[in-house]
Amino acid sequence: MDVEKQLEIIKRNTVDLINEEELKERLKEKSKLRIKLGVDPSRPDLHLGHAVVLKKLREFQDLGHQVVLIIGDFTARIGDPSGRSKTRPMLTLEEVKKNAESYQKQAFKILDKEKTEVRYNGEWFDKMTFHDVVKLSSHYTVARMLERDDFAKRLANNEPISVSEFLYPLAQAYDSVMVESDIEIGGTDQLFNLLVGRKIQEAYGQKSQIVLTMPIIEGTDGHLKMSKSYDNYIAFEDEPFDMYGKVMSIPDTLILKYMRLATDVPENEIKEYEKQMKENSVNPRDIKMKLAYEIVKFFHGKEKAEYAQNEFVKVFQKKDIPDEMEELTVEKEITAIDLLMKTNSISSKSEAKRLIKQGGVRINKTKINDPFQLLEIKDNDILRIGKRRFFNLKTK
């Protein structure tokens, strides 16, 4: 494919490109660029926020370029300070390895495994001497490091910054040296780290990588960035009905953004939806249902997407219950809080109490208000938790 056409595809939906002229030259020089994504497996599960970057990487693969996925088994133990108001806790090597296995499995739902080079940065960092670390750190100044927004704010507020946090951007940059990256991609919150990579590659005698950033998407609350920490995420491994329902819960203002960044819906079709919404000629709910269907289809296939949509219509529009529910066997008499904990879908008793007090728990159509209420359970009673979790109860 010619350079201009590749540029059009590469630039689509991106935020920063540093810089376009360098990218043009690199595309003319090399038919197969090395595109780097560094990920720290600090958590075991991926969500739609990660999908934005992974889908752009897949576009590079489809254009014939080499994707290099760096698993930060070493850097995860330092902790990326990006956007943090305090130092991240360090993970153990065992935690990192477990998360890394899960991360790769999920990433290959989007990336072509056969066209992905996977590297662990412990491969080079575990062999570095203190002399090597000093040499690396000599190529970047403290003044430049403190230009970074989160560091500058913490310094101004007299909040601690550990030396290890200064080392993190340098370590990420050194990854680029070791894999000879032509382009590094990340979210907009990674811009500083990616730019450090350009400087460090130059210091080690390489051509500086091109930097490409993708938008950060807001979570289901519509305000904060999607994150498990904020409980506003849609995970790759969510069950189809739950995934569909979560998408349907996003504000209407995010419909088109999600569609552009997290689906394969063509741009001309998205522009038509945009026009219809501006003219108020369509109910935004109908477009959101199309969005939810496309996202579930991508991760679970067409059949499960159709099932999730049918169940959603049944439960939320027809006010019915789903055809398929998990069976849960419990005692004939049990407190409300213990019943919720038996489902294994509640993280703690405090969460169970909160759900009950907020009116989010029902037996059949009766709302449960007291966490310690003694319930009398009959076979085939339906436990409903929140909007999307249903259990068919059986007694011992």
Image: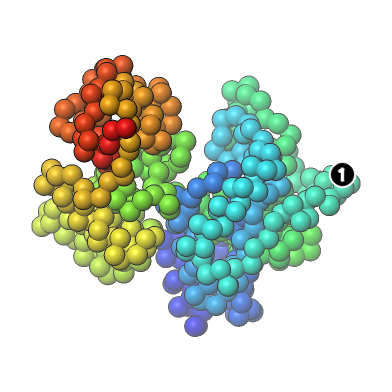
Callout 1: 10 Å neighbours few (<14), some, many (20+)? few
Which residue carries the number 1 mark?
130
Q: Residue at x 21, y 50 (%)?
A: 323
Left or right: 150 as drawn, with respect to 220: right
Q: Disc 1 marks which amino acid?
A: Phe
Left or right: 251 as drawn, with respect to 75: left
The C terminus sits in image quarter:
top left
Residue 386: percent from the left, percent from the top? 27, 35
Note whether 287 is above or below 159 in the view shown: below
User: In the displayed image of the protein, which residue is found farthest to the front?
Assistant: 396
Element type where label 1 sits in the image? helix
Residue 308: percent from the left, percent from the top? 26, 55
Residue 7: percent from the left, percent from the top? 48, 72
| Tally of marks | 1
Q: Is residue 179 visible?
A: yes
Q: Is residue 260 visible?
A: no
User: Depth check: 87 or 158 in front?
Assistant: 87
Colour scheme of this structure image?
A: rainbow
User: Depth check: 279 or 259 in front?
Assistant: 259
Residue 209: percent from the left, percent from the top? 65, 63
Report which quarter residue 287 is drawn in: bottom left
Q: Residue at x 24, y 61 (%)?
A: 306
Note whether 164 is above or below 4 in the view shown: above
Note whether 252 is above or below 260 in the view shown: above
User: Depth check: 291 or 34 in front?
Assistant: 291
Q: Residue at x 22, y 35 (%)?
A: 379
Q: Residue at x 59, y 43 (%)?
A: 42
User: Depth check: 263 or 19 in front?
Assistant: 263
User: In the displayed image of the protein, which residue is found farthest to the bottom?
Assistant: 1
